[in-house]
Image (cartoon, rainbow, N blue to C red):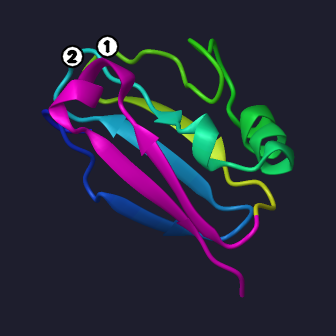
Amino acid sequence: MAGTRFSPEETTALAGDTVRFLNAGGGLHNVQFFADSIAPPVHGLLERAMPGDKIGPLAGPLLLDRNETYAIVVPALPAGRYPFVCRPHYASGMTGTLRVVRR
């Protein structure tokens, strides 16, 4: 997370991988997956994989400090793309994608 963009915009991971979101520049950021683009059974897997003080469904906590991180361990999701947004910067187009692949 830097400025109002995720870098990289797409992250590829396998189930069991840890994905870390780093607030590189400080300021208010988070990660929130789009619930309406995720099937209900998968929604529950992802929700349980997101630790901490969530600010809503499929939404991680707010990060304020420079170099603060938020990590999730990718659950056994079906292969595919899972879009997410920084809720405070959604209007600025701060979006990304978690691409889950199988071995």
**Which percent across, then down, holds residue 100?**
61, 68
The three-letter amino acid code for the residue at tag 1 is Leu
Residue sitting farthest toward the right:
41
Residue on which the image places disc 1:
64
**Which percent across, then down, holds residue 84?**
45, 43
Count residues near mark 1 (Cα–Cα under 10 Å), then give few for <14, some for 14-19, many for 20+. some
Count residues near mark 2 (Cα–Cα under 10 Å), then give few for <14, some for 14-19, many for 20+. some
Please tell me whether residue 43 is drawn above or below residue 12 in the rendered image.
above
Viewer-proximal residue, 89 or 62? 89
Among numbered discs 2 and 1, the one appearing first in the sequence: 2
Q: Residue placed at 32% from the left, 44% from the top?
A: 95
Residues in magenta, as a range: 78-103
What separation in Å lies between label 2 and label 1 (alpha carbons)?
5 Å
Q: Residue placed at 56% from the left, 12% from the top?
A: 55
Q: Residue placed at 36% from the left, 51% from the top?
A: 96
**Which percent across, then down, holds residue 22?**
35, 38
The kind of secondary structure element at disc 2 is loop
Please tell me whether residue 52 is drawn above or below residue 74 in the rendered image.
above
Query: Horizontal placement of 21 versus 51: left or right?
Result: left
**Which percent across, then down, holds residue 25?**
16, 29
Q: Is residue 99 rendered magenta in the image?
A: yes
Q: Residue placed at 21% from the left, 38% from the top?
A: 93
Q: Quadrant of residue 1?
A: top left
The tally of labels here is: 2
Query: Horizontal placement of 74 versus 37: left or right?
Result: right
Mark carried by residue 49: none
Quadrant in the picture for the C terminus: bottom right
Residue on which the image places disc 2:
27
Residue sitting farthest toward the front:
36
Q: Is residue 21 rendered magenta in the image?
A: no
